[in-house]
Every structure is written in structure tokens, then in C-alpha cells.
Amino acid sequence: MTTDTRQTGRALVLGGGGIAGIAWEAGLIVGLQGAGVDLTDADLIVGTSAGSVVGAMIATGVDLPLAIDDLAGRAETTPAPSAPADFSAVLTAFGMLFDTSLDPQEARARVGRMALEAPVADAADRLREVGERLPSHEWPERPLLITAVDTADGGFVVWDRESGATLPFAVMSSCAVPCVFPPVEIGGRFYMDGGVRSATNADLAAGSSAVVIIEPMAHLSPRPLLERELEALGTTNVVAVGPDQHAVEAFGHDVLDPALWRPAYHAGVIQAGSLVDRVQEVWKA
């Protein structure tokens, strides 16, 4: 595990957002690519939760439209979960994380205890599929950072090819939403969603000459945390992109709904057209 974030070149930061986030991020990237702005040639990729899936796909050279089509097709032929997620517990957990009266790491540790105690063992297979369905199970040569949080002490963890975690397990840990999926064991410790620390963890791109941040949950995330992360980057050559109204409506109220693969992807492709100039100004500077 490493937290050495000294970087050069251009960084692509991909935030969390469930199935909707994976699909929308992929659509946005594909749409921008079609307009001549290729974010897949980033020198560094930072992935949190949904962003860890898309980041792993990009870093290993996957064809995004084909990958999303495959995932959508699988979802259409797979029975829906018998027990829906308890989003009241999720809201309680994230309410704790947003409580400014608590020390951030202590808040994360409390959420970690909730995650370990939550009766969600039945969801383990669905989380395992996230790792198993990655088109490549090998870490790429190019820099890819995947975030997670230690349930025991709330410590922030950054996985990379030298960390000892396999790529599927790193991604699974980053996607282990507390009280929805069980924490993931790696090396005898248990880890949960990197979004518990931040929806983007954009400060990991500190030192990069240009940073594009794609945050599916921008419309629901407190802005002060992102603002602090932007200050830590050391460059003003940054653009942060959240979903537009059409995408937000496509997401609905459950970003983990398997029916969102195609509509969220298409919402991203469509939105990309309105973002070309903003993103190109940063990426090609």
C-alpha cells in the first residue's frame, strides 16, 4: 500500500456512484473521445468505488462500449437481488461521515464497525462478480491508484500494482459500500468503499499538471471536501464534471439498480457534447 502521491503529467480522477456511476462515467469518456478529447491517455488514473471499475477498464485498455454492453446484457439475464439494500443504514453511515463535529478518521472507524456488523453476507456474491467480471485481472503497467478504507481504524488505503492486493480484490474493496456489501478481506484486514473517505479522493492527483475529475455524485456530495482536495492539487488547471439534469433523472433514486447500465451510459454520451470545450481546455493545455 502506498500514499506517495507525487505525480507529473495529466491525471484522470474517477469518483464513486454505483452502477449509474460506472455507466455514466464510461459514456462520458466515450462521448468525449468521439469529440477528439481522449481522457484514456491519462498519465495517472485515480479510481474510487465505481471509478475503480472504470479506471481499471481504461488502464488495461478495455473497449468501454463493449464492456458496458456486456455488463448490461448480463444484468438483463440475471435475477434481481432477493433482498434490496437497506438504504436507511447507508444514509445513517454517510450522515456520520458528513458530521463535522467528528474527527474524520474516527467517523470512518464508526462506519467501519457498522459495515462489519451489517447483515449483508448474502450480497457477497454480487460484490465478487464486480471483480470477476473485470476484463483483465492483472494490474496495468501505467499508474492506477484504487482507494479503500480500513474498517478497523478508518485508515485510508491506496492500492496500486506494488501494494500486494490483486486488481479484482482492490476494486472489490473500493466498491464495498458499507451496509450494502460486506467488507473485503485483504491480507487479514477488512476494507470498505473508498468513497467513505471521499467521493473522489482527488487529492491523490497532487502534483499533476492537469486534472479532470469526473464525479457522478456531485449533486449529492458536500462541496467543502472537494474544495479542500482542489486546493491540495497544486494546479489550477483542473475541471470537475458532475452529472447534468438529464443524467440525474436517469440515475433515479437507486444508483445500484442493474437497469441503469444502458440509460446512464447514454446519458453520459449525450452530456459529453456540452463538455468538450471545458475539458479540452484543461486536457490539451
Image (cartoon, rainbow, N blue to C red):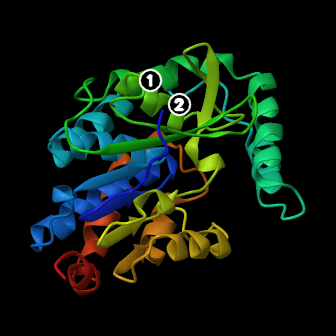
Kindly identify which residue carries mark 2.
Answer: 173
Name the foreground residue: 260 vs 156.
Answer: 156
Q: Label 2, secondary structure: give it.
A: helix
Kindly identify which residue carries mark 1.
Answer: 169
Q: Are marks 1 and 2 in contact (CB under 8 Å)?
A: yes
Quadrant of the rendered structure where residue 149 is? top right
Circle 1 crowding by C-alpha within 10 Å: few under 14, some 14–19, many from 20: many
Give the residue furthest to the right: 101
Residue at 53% from the left image edge and 43% from the top image edge: 256
Residue at 40% from the left image edge and 61% from the top image edge: 205
Image coords of residue 30 (percent x, y)? 19, 60
Distance in Å between CA atoms under marks 1 and 2 = 6 Å
Image coords of residue 200 (percent x, y)? 51, 58
Residue at 19% from the left image edge and 56% from the top image edge: 40
Q: Is residue 237 left or right of residue 196?
A: left
Number of marks present in the image shown? 2
Looking at the image, residue 215 lies above or below residue 238: above
| Quarter occupied by the C terminus | bottom left
Residue at 44% from the left image edge and 75% from the top image edge: 234
